[in-house]
Image (cartoon, rainbow, N blue to C red):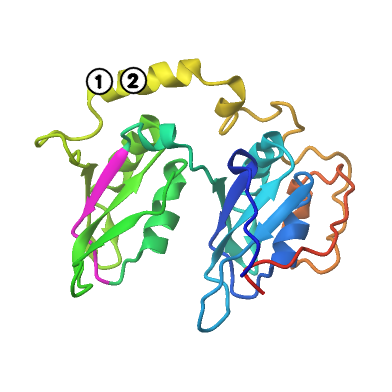
Amino acid sequence: MAQQIERNQDATVYVGNLDERCTETLVWELMLQAGPVVNVHLPKDRVTQSHQGYGFCEFMTEEDADYAIRIMNQIKLYGKPIRVNKATSDKKNLDVGATLFVGNLDPDVDEKMLYDVFSAFGVIVQTPKIARDAETGNFKGYGFVTYDNFDSSDAAIDAMNGQYLMNKEVNVSYAFKKDGKGERHGSQAERLLAAQAKKNAPASASMFGGPPGMGRPPMGMAGGRPPPPMNGLPSAVPYNSVPTTQGYRPPPPPPMGGK
């Protein structure tokens, strides 16, 4: 049994859309450009032992994680733009109510595709769910996406409702509440509660999406000529956009994933 280590969720980012050639060492070295890394984990398929295209990176501080989100999101590794978002399990975020129903899904759409498409509009706080029959596992044609704020969910509805995913035109709206007697999420009451909770939250929680220069140099301002790529990292990474003033070199990543 692998030792269970308590992860600092506030200092952890989700890293998605990873090429199959990416390794934990590679992600470790890339993320080190944002700050000291504590842990990198790419969940592996039990049968093939290959990673599943996503993982988690824990930094020393929440500030480093917020900085990584701002400078690493959409950087290309092996030609694929990676997605870097906050990996939060904060129950207060889950209770915001910014949950969307995505209907008329093509059978080829899976949870990963929903995440990759809808994370463009904001921080998704739990893995998107696609409805399947509990007994047969058959695809039901709809799913759910939950954001940490209503600005993101509103933007997703405006942009995606009526758009095509694979070969079908999807409909996107606020989901019905589980115990709401036919009421949908996104109500004025939920929005007022979310606004009040945000007002009471510590200032550091609002750093995501803040203007460049909030506590760190903005992207592309490392100064002078761009530094050469670090050894072992794919040349597709645009290092001229990643400040390298930290100067850290990573230790070998600790064994993870139950090896």
Residue 236 seen in the current view:
no
Displayed quadrant of residue 233: bottom right
Q: Please, is residue 26 above or below residue 220 in the view? A: below
Q: CA distance from mark 2 to mark 1?
A: 6 Å
- As drawn, the residue found furthest toward the bottom would be 48
Q: Residues within 10 Å of mark 2 (few under 14, many from 20)?
A: some
Q: Secondary structure at mark 1?
A: helix
Where is residue 56 drawn, in percent x and y?
60, 55
Q: Examine the rendered structure and indicate whether residue 111 appears above or below residue 199.
A: below
- Please state which of residues 207 and 117 is positioned toward the viewer in this rendering: 207
Q: Residue furthest left?
A: 181
Q: Name the residue carrying label 2.
A: 193
Task: Give left or right: position of 152 versus 43.
Answer: left
- Crowdedness near tag 1: few (<14), some (14–19) or many (≥20) residues, C-alpha within 10 Å: few
Label pair 2/1, CB-CB below 8 angstroms: yes
What amino acid is found at the position of numbered circle 2 in the picture? Leu
Q: Which residues are magenta?
A: 99-107
Query: In the image, what residue occupies the spot 36% across and 54% down?
Result: 128
Position of 7 relative to 79 (above/below)? above
> Would residue 200 be found to the left or right of residue 77 on screen?
left
Identify which residue is drawn at 54% across, 83% down: 48
Which of the two residues, 52 or 163, is positioned nearer the viewer here? Answer: 52
Q: Which residue is mark 1?
A: 189
Where residue 58 appears, as percent x and y from the top left, is 67, 49
Q: Quadrant of residue 133?
A: bottom left
User: Which quadrant does the N terminus fall into?
Assistant: bottom right
Is residue 51 visible to the viewer in this orientation of the structure?
A: yes
Quarter holding residue 148: top left
